[in-house]
Image (spheres, rainbow, N blue to C red):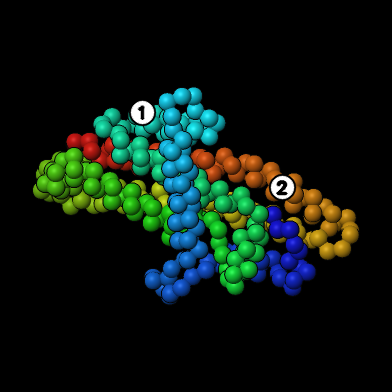
Amino acid sequence: MASASGAEHGTSPTDYIVHHLTHLQVGEGFWTWHLDTLFMSALLAVVVGWVFWAAARRATSGVPGKFLGFIELILEFVDGQVADIYHGDRRFMVALALSLFTWIIAMNTMDLLPLDLPGGVAALFGLEYWRVLPTADLNGTIAMAIVVLLLIIVAAIRSKGLGGYLHEWVSAPFGNNPILWIPNICLNFVELLSKPVSLGMRLFGNMFAGELLFMLIALLGFTVVGVTFGSAFGFFGQIVMGTAWAIFHILIVVLQAYIFMVLPIVYIAMAEEHH
């Protein structure tokens, strides 16, 4: 949903997309740090934490206001989802699910900002690049998925003990025959590794595709040069298509946060089961 024509600034459609897909980064190779992803993730985590802190400060025994009622509605929804999946002491699981759900929604919502606005604000501070959507960065989504993976391993060891957990690696699913230890270990390794990979890739893929589609719609603004039928069509097409996709994208924003909230709880519940 670009408001300015790239043609007026001597920018080609390819340059426009490449510029919007480039991170503000430092370092090289494996040690490249995407500063915009780190900053936006931390900032939105603080914002979400502040919202819940403000709600807790307003909590009373009387009838809650609209703001507090909305927060309670979210908490009850998350608690209900966790209760359907995890049948043990779910206090930590509810906290984990609530943190993931609200934080990811906050990050995903950044995709609904006008496309050129974040870069324009960043330019005021002398920054050439700034991607405002952390979940469209594979580094960010995989990092969250790795944390989930560590929680899965910790939950399994806590439930079964280190010996019991390692025993399952060699005995499940084919049994405790020494000949089948290697196939068991290989299958368990693939299963364990596929969880964070699929979790991170799913969120990244959906949000990156949504961000890219916004950019393609914004390219209609490149036709707005002078007052002609073509430029008018491009201008109104950009507004109509951008609005329609933004409304539909709200569903994706919430759905992807819900999936990333539910699957870790499912994985942890499975990890604590005894085979």
Q: Nearer the viewer, residue 37 or 240?
A: 37
Of tags 1 and 2, the one toward the viewer is 1
Q: CA distance from mark 1 to mark 2?
A: 39 Å
58 to 245, vertically: above or below: above
Q: Residue furthest bottom?
A: 28
Amino acid beneath label 1: Asp
Is residue 132 among what the camera can see? yes
Q: Quadrant of the N terminus?
A: bottom right
236 to 70, vertically: above or below: below
Q: Check whether the beta carbons of the residues at disc 1 and disc 2 lie within 8 A of each other.
A: no
Q: Quadrant of residue 15?
A: bottom right
Q: In this figure, which residue is indicated by the disc labeled 2?
A: 241
Residue 216: horizontal and vertical position, in percent? 67, 56
Q: Residues within 10 Å of mark 2 (few under 14, many from 20)?
A: some
Q: Secondary structure at mark 2?
A: helix
198 to 258, vertically: above or below: below
Left or right of 13? Residue 252 is left
Left or right of 160? Residue 135 is right
Residue at the image position 58 percent from the left and 52 percent from the top: 111
Residue 218: horizontal and vertical position, in percent? 70, 57
Residue at the image position 59 percent from the left and 42 percent from the top: 250
Is residue 104 among what the camera can see? no
Q: Secondary structure at mark 1?
A: helix
Q: Residues within 10 Å of mark 1 (few under 14, many from 20)?
A: few
Left or right of 165? Residue 130 is right
Q: Nearer the viewer, residue 116 or 84?
A: 116
Amino acid beneath label 2: Met
Q: In this figure, which residue is indicated by the disc labeled 1?
A: 84
Q: Quadrant of the C terminus?
A: top left
Residue 215: horizontal and vertical position, in percent? 65, 57
Residue at the image position 71 percent from the left and 47 percent from the top: 241
Residue at the image position 61 percent from the left and 49 percent from the top: 112
